[in-house]
Image (cartoon, rainbow, N blue to C red):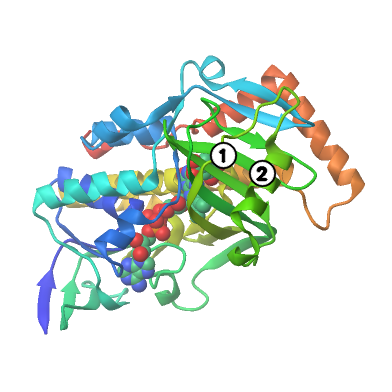
Amino acid sequence: MARLNTQVGIVGAGPAGLLLAHLLHLNGIDSVVIENRSREHVIDRVRAGVLEQGTVDLLVAMGVGDGALRRGLRHEGLYISFKGRRHRIDMAELTGGKAITVYGQNEVVKDLIDARAATGRRLYFEAAHVSVDGLDASQPIIRFEHDGTDHELGCDFIAGCDGFHGICRPSIPDGALTVYERIYPFGWLGLLVEAAPSSDELVYTHHERGFALFSMRSPAVTRLYFQVPPDEPIQHWSDAAIWDELLARMTTSDGWKPNIGRIVQKSVTPMRSFVATPMRHARLFLAGDAAHIVPPTGAKGLNLAASDVLVLARALKAFYEHRREEWLDEYSDVCLRRVWKAQRFSWWMTSTLHHSPDGSAFDHQRQIADLDYLTSSRAAMTSLAEQYVGLPADVSLDSVGL
Ligand code: FAD
Ligand code: DHB
């Protein structure tokens, strides 16, 4: 049995865990990151792509933003398409110059793993049987097996950054959490395609056959998503059927459509809204998808993980530097204000743009009116733009020493 100690034990090496580890390092606070999957698996997982302005600013201030600045694609606008027409929303003009950056989550994770390795601080991949214990004690413990040896890690605090299916949230005693949840009657089939993007900016399409989304990863790689039933078996979709469906939904009356190419990756994701409150139990703090999930239509999940850990890093810094506990006590409330606004936005984008299988003809007309108003009112476009580029964080970069 190996016995270890650290200040903050972090479960999960996704964006939340790795960002927190590096923010703590920059403030001289030690942590150990414990991840149950392999390094290759974590880096190859294709997921989010849209970074809010504030997330990019955070990466840059932390000294890990070179990749996002150099290889990321800065987008100052996006398109909303319905009834066969694309309508551009000029986000930068409406928000005083703010934009989003398209940069794959796997690239962000790779940059953060490299940064972690350069610090010499500990990060375990392929940890088995990870569990947390003694959350109410002064030294909670993370147990795991690595390379055939049992490990026991004593910590001052545990950060549960292990995503929606992790072990931290279920380790909180029954009755201590209140859960808010909505499950949607559809999912997304996501594709990575070897084809040059046919638009410089994202296109969110409302269509009676269902929602579709055009995005990208690089000047040579297109990323596409389209609405399918939530439990759709991927083998129902041959490549030819996928292209027929995408072109039927996405082609606009001016002839715009995505370029066709070799499909190199495809997967189905179900969609849900989920919040567990409070985001803290005794010495365990939940951050990112471990505490909340948004449907991906608003592109908010990774960005919320970043804002959670900013709030947590501020609180831990104040604790270690001044033994101040009030920011630890406020952690959940401060995060949840931003989380609920992102929940509302993600729900609204989802319900306005998707075809609901149990929706009525009235619902369809209401959606069209919503989209017509959105794309013709400067006030409505400004509202979408300021939420899409990211509402301001409640915590400044100064407060985490950046
Ligand atoms: P995760 O990325 O899930 O990381 C959790 C980590 O914990 C993982 O590495 C996991 O292997 C590890 N783990 C799990 N269990 C254990 C255990 N028992 N022990 C140790 N480790 C464990 N968000 C956006 O902001 N913009 C987008 O454009 C966007 N698009 C998306 C598109 C799709 C198709 C999907 C699925 C998601 C999208 N998201 C988007 C959401 C985004 O990917 C997530 O919100 C983000 O990954 C959350 O980061 P996290 O670190 O909290 O959790
Ligand atoms: C991407 C994902 C999203 O969920 C979204 O809303 C926009 C873009 C993407 O993966 O590129």
**Residue 89 x, y percent position in the rendering:** 62, 22
**Residue 282 x, y percent position in the rendering:** 35, 67
Residue drawn at (59%, 51%), measured in percent from left and top?
A: 295
- In the image, is 74 to the left or to the right of 181? left
In the image, 400 versus 38, the foreground residue is: 38
From mark 1 to mark 2, how far is it between C-alphas?
A: 10 Å
**Residue 41 x, y percent position in the rendering:** 32, 62
Q: How many residues crowd around disc 2 within 10 Å: few (fewer than 14), some, or many (20 or more)? A: many
Give the labeled residue for mark 1: 260
- In the image, is 285 to the left or to the right of 374? left
Q: Amino acid at mark 2?
A: Leu
Q: Is residue 292 above or below residue 99?
A: below
Q: Amino acid at mark 1?
A: Ile
In the image, 15 versus 155, the foreground residue is: 15
Residue drawn at (46%, 22%), measured in percent from left and top?
A: 98
Q: Is residue 216 above or below residue 268?
A: above
Give the labeled residue for mark 2: 246
